[in-house]
Image (cartoon, rainbow, N blue to C red):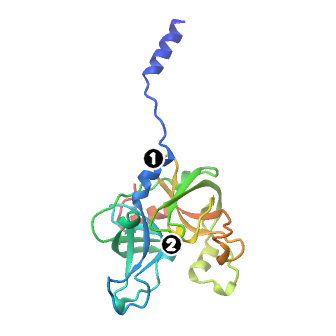
Amino acid sequence: MLRIVVTLWLLALVPVVRAASLPDVIDRVRPAVVGIGTAYPARQPNRKGDPVTYRGTGFVVGNGRQVVTNAHVIPEKLDTDNNESLTVFSGRGAKSIVHRARVLSTDSLHDLVLLEIEGGPLPALEIGNSDAVREGAEVAFTGFPIGIVLGLYPVTHRGIVAALTPMARPVENARALNAVQMQRLRNPFDVFQLDAIAYPGNSGSPVYELSSGRVIGVLNSVFVKESKESILAKPSGISYAIPAKYVKALLQNTGNVAE
């Protein structure tokens, strides 16, 4: 009896470590999630497009001035004659801040790009070990699912890693294959298939562990059941994410250390 009492007394002295709740994790992740787009200077009289164009989501890494997003989010060319610039939007709603950005490095095969923003550093996310992720793991991703239609307010979705599946998937029209897609068909790599609803504006969103907020993937595509036009009304609930090990490689190749 004495031994049992002493054991219970010792256990009472051990501090209870509780896992962070999802709201706490989102509070840590959200400041590092940014919008990606283009912008013209204010009162530009000769611009050809809208003052601001939203293209996708990104997240801050490294020293706080590097941003990761999908390569397909970045426009192929800018209206340089009228000073259109690549832009990162941080903050929320009316308090959002515009940062000019430039491309540091691109990994077209894995649909990733690393940007550098002007100005001071922003809160950065930690890159986790994507090789340790197992099917059934609970994850979340935060981004801008319908762009800035609803304002610059990050939205979080959660789900599980439903499968590890090869990235190379045939396109509807073989004539649409480009050089990168051909390379993927020859050298497929595994990505995370997620059981979670995502939309085109989520491209580049960080996919992270619920318990820690460490990034284990980058959302880059959704499965379309019928047509691109029906994706908002009839989302498939199937999306895909590039494993974060390729983000680490991109950072290392650019001279940044990924923790």
Q: In this view, does 52 lie to the left or right of 150?
A: left
| Label 1: which secondary element | helix
Q: In which quarter of the image is residue 81?
A: bottom left
Q: Residue at x 53, y 11 (%)?
A: 4
Q: Residue at x 42, y 21 (%)?
A: 13
Q: Residues within 10 Å of mark 2 (few under 14, many from 20)?
A: few
In front here: 233 or 206?
A: 233
Residue type pointed to by label 2: Val
The location of residue 140, given as percent across then percent down, is 54, 55
Disc sitting over residue 10 in the figure: none
The quadrant of the image that shows the N terminus is: top right
Task: Give the residue number, with chain letter if any, for mark 2.
Answer: 149
Q: Quadrant of residue 241?
A: bottom right
Residue 20 in sight in this render: yes
Residue 226, placed above or below residue 11: below
The location of residue 178, given as percent across then percent down, is 59, 84
The location of residue 196, given as percent across then percent down, is 62, 59
The quadrant of the image that shows the C terminus is: bottom left
Q: Is residue 3 left or right of residue 85?
A: right
Task: Give the residue number, with chain letter if any, for mark 1.
Answer: 24
In front here: 58 or 258?
A: 58
Residue 32, placed above or below residue 40: above
Residue type pointed to by label 1: Asp
Q: Residues within 10 Å of mark 1 (few under 14, many from 20)?
A: some
Q: In this view, does 234 lie to the left or right of 207?
A: right
Whether label 1 touches label 2, CB < 8 Å = no
